[in-house]
Amino acid sequence: MTICCCCHIGGPAEVSDADLPPARSNLAVTVLTRKDEAEAVRVGSAGFAGNGSAPGEPVQAWVLGGDPTGALPTAGGRQAHIDYIIRCSFLQAQSFGGVVLGAKLDGQLAGIAIAYPPGRMIDPGSSDELCMFGHICCCKMSCATPPNDPMALHMSSVKPRFAAFEKAMKSEALAAVWRPLRKQYWKLEVIAVDAPCRGQGVGTALVQAVHHLADKDGAPTYVEFAGEQLLSFYTKQGFGEHDASCDLEHGGSTITMYARVRNGNSSNGAAVVQGGSSAKVAPDTMARS
């Protein structure tokens, strides 16, 4: 453990390929390291952005589509914003006890997942979270700041949706699911599959690899996501159907965020909230935990 800035920085979780399920046919899941950063960011960003035939990540699409005048962020600004998010997420996992998994089709990276083992997630809105972002920005990204595209997130017309999303991460509706687990769960933080590789079991292989790690620890798996398509996907992956949800509303548009738990083969007695809760949330009324 070394000291950097004000943070006690460790490294990634101690997970190796030997801890993962065996490869099947032409699809294998492996642990990615810092040397894989560029390719992981490229594939993760492509998955989050989507294309004309494959949807991108629903929350980012909703936030960036928040300008009622129709002057959406430029294509370059949108891509720069997504690249920044994926790179920051990758570096956070590598520095703060997470694991980055890569799914390879015929030897080529097709998708990534970022997950955290029990006890390693940082509480939303805490001083630890601020310190973590400061470390990533200053010590890992050469003090890079989010993209300064004039049509991007800092637009006054887009800011309310981004604020709604930020508050959702701290809401009581979602905390009602993760708080009773007392941090003894695996958190699936990011999953992204390159558009041309979808429909070939890449996303399923990544989720099942995280389940495999959780089962080895006797812990549940927890995930937060948005959109009906992902709701169907995660339900098929064994996550509960009735945990919690909250609606983000702005400008006549609504997106539903979900919190789901997959209890799996947990043997540590962690409670799983059934029934959960639901709420409708405007940007200025989201409860904070």
Image (cartoon, rainbow, N blue to C red):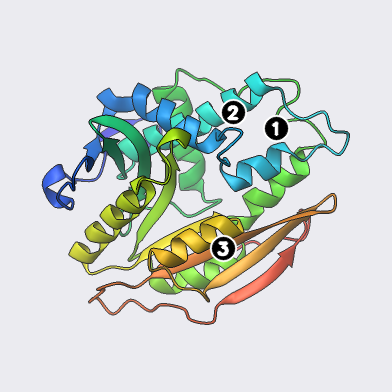
> Circle 2 is placed at which residue position?
81
On-image quarter of the C terminus = bottom right
Q: Which mark is residue 175?
A: none
Q: Which residue sits furthest left?
A: 18
Mark nearer the N terminus (1 vs 2): 2
Label 3 to label 1: alpha-carbon separation: 23 Å
> Circle 1 is placed at which residue position?
153
Q: Nearer the viewer, mark 3 or mark 1?
A: 3
Q: Are marks 3 and 1 in contact (CB under 8 Å)?
A: no
Say whether residue 95 is visible. no
Q: Nearer the viewer, residue 103 or 85?
A: 103
Mark nearer the N terminus (3 vs 1): 1
Say if 37 sits above or below 64 in the image: above
How many numbered marks does the figure carry?
3
Q: Nearer the viewer, residue 151 or 194?
A: 194
**What residue sits 31% from the left and 36% below the top?**
94
Label 1 to label 2: alpha-carbon separation: 8 Å
**What residue sits 70% from the left and 37% below the top?**
64
Q: Nearer the viewer, residue 88 or 126?
A: 88
Q: Are marks 1 and 2 in contact (CB under 8 Å)?
A: yes
Secondary structure type for disc 1: loop
Say if 143 sits above or below 238 in the image: above
**What residue sits 23% from the left and 59% below the top?**
212
> Residue 1: x percent and y percent?
22, 38
Amino acid identity at mark 3: Tyr
Secondary structure type for disc 3: strand
Mark nearer the N terminus (2 vs 3): 2
Label 2 to label 3: alpha-carbon separation: 23 Å
> Residue 152: x percent and y percent?
71, 28
Amino acid identity at mark 1: Leu
